[in-house]
Image (spheres, grey):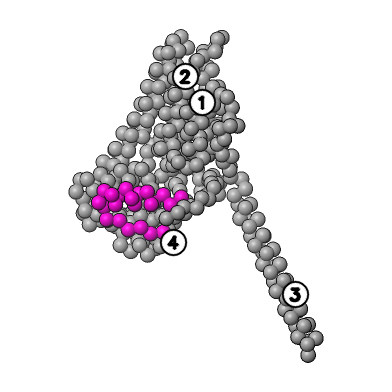
């Protein structure tokens, strides 16, 4: 009897080991399939001040580290930080002998741009802003004195930030105020600087409304928006992305921020935005996107696998 019991226990252990091996192989196979879907995407190498070239300006080093650690987030904040750093690069730039500023400065800016790209993949708005700056440099008068040329370029950068971001946000807020009425329940996803400014301005105008903030990992950016709106006295509800179907039953409008707008009308924004927009469409709730024109792109994107960003997952404490 003891021998039979030992044989049964050996068989059971063998079966358990076999099942464990099969499940492990299936998990490895599924992980390989998932990894293959994202293998073409660029992974940020991270900013490392000690390994940076001597040509990298200190201002660019600082924002590169801030980008890599997600201390500066959001397309507008990243674009303004980049242009402000490039202003300092231009102010400290000295044209070498035997060349001109308009010809050599783009070469001097190239390693600065490469360092920022290695810190974190460049946003569409940053790319458009840098192309605009390079165009301004290439069209400058060769006979213009270096000091005058640098002053002019710094003025062009200030004008771009003012006209394409600051004033554009004010115009978006003024149009958005026409869409918010007393008694509205507004849903927004994560945190957008334009949507935040719109909601604060609507509250300052005395419009009575409620806000539902839907958030998701890994960044949990909606927590910052929640604090800001609650401090201003706006009634808010906080929910995670998996509960969006439940909270939409009371929503009258959805306001979303944008990373970019593609030429085919596709919206490019943080992960989870498509789910919120599709759920709202299913319930016939209007979706309003706040986006500046400098984020418009000539590219076409049909899915989330062609162009995206892989980031480090960071645990966030509540």
Which residue carries the number 2 mark? Answer: 92
**Which residue, as the protein is rendered here, is positioned at the far right?**
3
Mark 4 vs mark 2, CA separation in Å = 50 Å
Name the one closer to the observer, 85 or 114: 85
Quadrant of image for the N terminus: bottom right
Q: Is disc 4 in contact with disc 2, using a CB cutoff of under 8 Å? A: no
Mark 4 vs mark 3, CA separation in Å = 40 Å
Is any part of residue 177 visible from this angle? Answer: no
Which residue carries the number 1 mark? Answer: 57
Q: Tell me residue 307's x, y (percent).
A: 54, 44
**Mark 3: secondary structure:** helix
Q: Which label number is shown at residue 242? A: 4
**Mark 1: secondary structure:** loop
Vertical position of residue 165 compared to residue 1: above or below: above
**Mark 2: secondary structure:** loop
For marks 1 and 2, the one nearer the N-term is: 1
**Which residue, as the protein is rendered here, is positioned at the far front?**
2
**Mark 4: secondary structure:** helix
For marks 2 and 3, the one nearer the N-term is: 3
Vertical position of residue 143 compared to residue 128: above or below: above
Q: Is disc 4 in contact with disc 1, using a CB cutoff of under 8 Å? A: no
Q: Tell me residue 196's x, y (percent).
A: 32, 46
The answer to whether residue 236 is left or right of residue 68 is left
Looking at the rendered image, the disc whose residue lies closer to the viewer, 4 or 1, is 1
Residue bounds of the magenta highlight: 219-240
- Point 32% across, 38% down: residue: 169
């Amino acid at each position: 009897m003891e021998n039979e019991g030992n044989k049964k226990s050996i068989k059971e252990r063998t079966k358990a080991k076999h099942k464990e091996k099969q499940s492990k192989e299936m998990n490895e196979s599924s992980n390989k399939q998932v990894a293959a879907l994202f293998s073409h995407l660029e992974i940020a190498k991270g900013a490392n001040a000690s390994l940076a070239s001597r040509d990298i300006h200190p201002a660019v080093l600082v924002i590169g580290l801030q980008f890599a650690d997600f201390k500066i987030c959001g397309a507008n904040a990243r674009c303004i930080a980049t242009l402000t750093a490039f202003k300092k690069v231009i102010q400290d730039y000295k044209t070498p002998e035997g060349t001109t500023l308009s010809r050599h400065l783009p070469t001097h800016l190239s390693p600065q741009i490469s360092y920022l790209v290695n810190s974190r993949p460049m946003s569409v708005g940053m790319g458009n802003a840098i192309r605009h700056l390079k165009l301004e440099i290439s069209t400058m008068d060769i006979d213009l004195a270096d000091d005058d040329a640098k002053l002019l370029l710094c003025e062009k950068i200030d004008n771009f930030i003012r006209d394409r971001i600051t004033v554009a946000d004010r115009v978006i807020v003024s149009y958005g105020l026409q869409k918010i009425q007393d008694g509205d329940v507004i849903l927004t996803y994560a945190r957008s600087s334009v949507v935040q400014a719109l909601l604060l301005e609507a509250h300052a105008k005395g419009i009575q409304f409620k806000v539902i903030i839907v958030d998701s990992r890994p960044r949990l950016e909606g927590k910052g928006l929640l604090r800001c709106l609650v401090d201003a006295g706006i009634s808010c509800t906080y929910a995670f992305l998996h509960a969006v179907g439940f909270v939409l039953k009371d929503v009258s409008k959805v306001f979303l921020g944008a990373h970019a707008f593609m030429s085919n009308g596709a919206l490019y924004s943080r992960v989870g935005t498509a789910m919120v927009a599709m759920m709202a469409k299913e319930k016939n709730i209007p979706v309003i996107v706040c986006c500046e024109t400098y984020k418009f792109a000539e590219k076409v994107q049909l899915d989330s696998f062609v162009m995206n960003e892989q980031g480090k997952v960071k645990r966030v404490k509540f």
